[in-house]
Every structure is written in structure tokens, then in C-alpha cells.
Image (cartoon, rainbow, N blue to C red):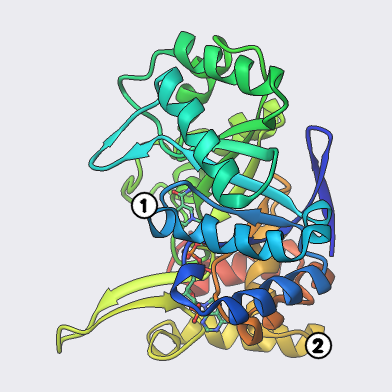
Amino acid sequence: MDYIDIGEIKTSRLALGCMRISDKPIKNVERLISVALDIGINLFDHADIYGGGSCEAIYGKIIKSEPSLRDRMVIQTKCGICSGRYDLSADHIVESVEGSLTRLNTDRIDILLLHRPDTLMRPEQIARAFDRLERDGKVRAFGVSNFSARQIEFLQANIHQKLWVNQMQLSPVYCPIIDSGINVDRPQEYCGADGLLEYCRTNGVTLQTYGTMQCEFTEDSGYVYCGAFTAEPARSRYFALNFRLQGLAEKYGATPEAVAIAWILHHPANMQAIIGTTLDEHLLAYKGCCDVKLTDCEWYEIYKSAGHNLP
Ligand SMILES: NC(=O)c1ccc[n+]([C@@H]2O[C@H](COP(=O)([O-])OP(=O)(O)OC[C@H]3O[C@@H](n4cnc5c(N)ncnc54)[C@H](OP(=O)(O)O)[C@@H]3O)[C@@H](O)[C@H]2O)c1
């Protein structure tokens, strides 16, 4: 596993997303966390709203039953989405963190992200909340998610802490933050994509990717598939991509899933990939991702095989 620093915190380049862990029995989640730690993952991504708080709660139960695990983990959580609206007021941010600390059975959040930009955000309120959380030792590092370059710039100019992270959706099949910079034929799918990569690279903001393996489509029968593009029925639909991933997997002695993550990690923006699997056997497929060193040519082959055309 490779690691990068978020501020003073050493974090694995592959992270485990905990958005669906409350769907599983606690024994399975314990096994999932154990496998994650075994393969070198130390960054675990949460949010106050995942499972209505139950994802943090089940994770907190595991920490309570095995307190020595806590120091092997970097816990990241998010706040700011409330039922049907956003709330980045000072009171809400602080209350949300207090709730996460209680559910997670911990005295500190390692990294706190604002989950989505709020058009009504008042940066002086965010500054007040961040100052208090930092002073009280409740949060060690701060960041955002789904923010455009302009929104990060705006917030950063008005707070005292550095914003270290921006978490965004990115995968070979869904990549507006890349397309917007290089592919003039593609329509702009995501309004915050333009110039974001370059902003983050210039300003030392680490991009974390979510939806890294995810795709979504509706069959003629009305069946809605939402899962990895490397698994059926998506595998057949993304035939060219999976054919390419399989070929590179054979070349590198890895799995196609590890090659898909290597595609994220190869980008010189030095990103981190978040994986949202809930199954330890699926998680093991990513084990060798940092050992796959793609060439630039292979990177573009994967990009194009996912349906993105270039001249
Ligand atoms: N900041 C935000 O706005 C935001 C939004 C969404 C998510 N997130 C974070 O990002 C994390 C990951 O997002 P995501 O859920 O979209 O994750 P993802 O890893 O891209 O997709 C997860 C889906 O793919 C399946 N999957 C993953 N690996 C597989 C494998 N090897 N074989 C077969 N199926 C596989 C999973 O099913 P199984 O569980 O059966 O493996 C699940 O259905 C979340 O947990 C959350 O922490 C953040």
C-alpha cells in the first residue's frame, strides 16, 4: 500500500467507504475492517447521514469492543446534508461533529469534510465552527466534498485552516473532472468540474474519488443496476473497458479491479481512491492496486475503452 500525507496525517491511497456497512451484520463488518487493515488501508470514510447515523454507530461499536483498533485508523466523516437541504451553519457543524464522536466512540475526528457546497454558506460561520473544533482537539484536519474550484477558493479565503481534501465522483466511466479539461466533444455533465483538477494540484488539495467502481443504468425490463462496472450485468455493457482491464491485469499479474484503481492512482494529481464495497472478498480484489504502474498510453487506452473519444 502507498500512503500520502493529509496535513500531518499519513493516509492510505486506497480508502474504505463506509456508506453501506449498516446493511450487513456486525460480524461481517468486523471482517471487512480487519481485511482492510491487513492490506494496509488506514483511511475509513464516513458521513453523519450514512444509514441515518447507523454506519457510524456500527463502526463505533467495533471500536468499543476492540479499542486498540482506533490508533490504526484515520477516521474521516462529513457533515452539512440535512433532510432535504444543506446546513453549514456553525451550530449545525459543531452539533454534527459531536454526534459523530458519540456514535463512533472516539474523542477525535481525524478529517472532517463539508459534504456538499451550500449556496447559503456563510464562511464566517464555518470559520467559527472550524476554530472551535480545532481548539477543542475534536477535529485534526478539514476539507470539502463536491466543491468546485471557485467554491474552495472562496471558502479558503475566509477560514484559518487549510482545506486539505476535496472528495469528488470519478471513475473511468464517469469522469467530468477529467473530460472538462481535455475533451471538447463532451457536454459538461457536472457544473463544478471545470478547472478543478488544476486548482487542486496548484493548491495542494488532495482529490479523493468516490463512485470509483460504480455505474448505474436501467434495463429495458425496468431493472435498475447500481454497482461495479467490473461485475455482471455491467461487465457485458462495458465490454471494451473490461476487455482492456483484463488484458492489463494479465500483463501486471493483478486483478481487473486493481487495474481500475491504478487508473485513478496513476494521475499525477496524486489522488486517493475510496472503495465502497461491503464484502471482504470483494475488497481483496483491490489488494495489489498500488503495485500496478500503468504507462500514460495504457491510462488513455482505459479512458477511451470506457467510451470517451479523443481525436
Ligand atoms: N462525498 C460524496 O458525496 C459521496 C457520495 C457517495 C459515496 N461517497 C463515499 O464513497 C464511498 C464509495 O462510493 P460508492 O459506494 O459509489 O463505491 P464504489 O466502490 O464505486 O461502488 C460500490 C458498489 O460496487 C460494488 N463493488 C465494489 N467492488 C466490487 C467488486 N470487487 N466486485 C463486485 N462488486 C463490487 C459494491 O457492491 P458490494 O458491496 O457487494 O461489493 C457496490 O454496489 C462510499 O462508501 C462513501 O464513503 C461519498
Q: Give the mark toward the camera: 1 or 2.
A: 2
Q: Residues within 10 Å of mark 2 (few under 14, many from 20)?
A: some
Residue 13 vertical placement versus 5 (above, below): below
Q: Could you tell me residue 178's position as x and y percent? A: 52, 49
Q: CA distance from mark 1 to mark 2?
A: 35 Å
Q: Is residue 197 visible?
A: yes
Q: Is residue 293 visible?
A: no
* Mark 2 secondary-structure assignment: loop
143 with respect to 136 (left or right): left
* Mark 1 secondary-structure assignment: loop
144 with respect to 68 (left or right): left
x 45%, y 67%: residue? 173
What label sits on residue 64 in the rendered view?
Answer: none
> In the figure, residue 64 lies in which quadrant?
bottom right
Q: Amino acid at mark 2?
A: Gly
x 48%, y 87%: residue? 231
| Count of number-bearing discs | 2
10 or 132, nearer to the observer: 132
Residue 17 vertical placement versus 154 (above, below): below
Q: Amino acid at mark 1?
A: Asp
Q: Could you tell me residue 75's position as x and y percent? A: 68, 49
x 70%, y 60%: residue? 63
The residue to which callout 1 is attached is 185
x 31%, y 23%: residue? 119
Residue 288 vertical placement versus 106 (above, below): below
110 or 234, nearer to the observer: 110
The residue to which callout 2 is attached is 253
Residue 269 vertical placement versus 128 (above, below): below
Q: Is mark 2 within 8 Å of ligand 1?
A: no
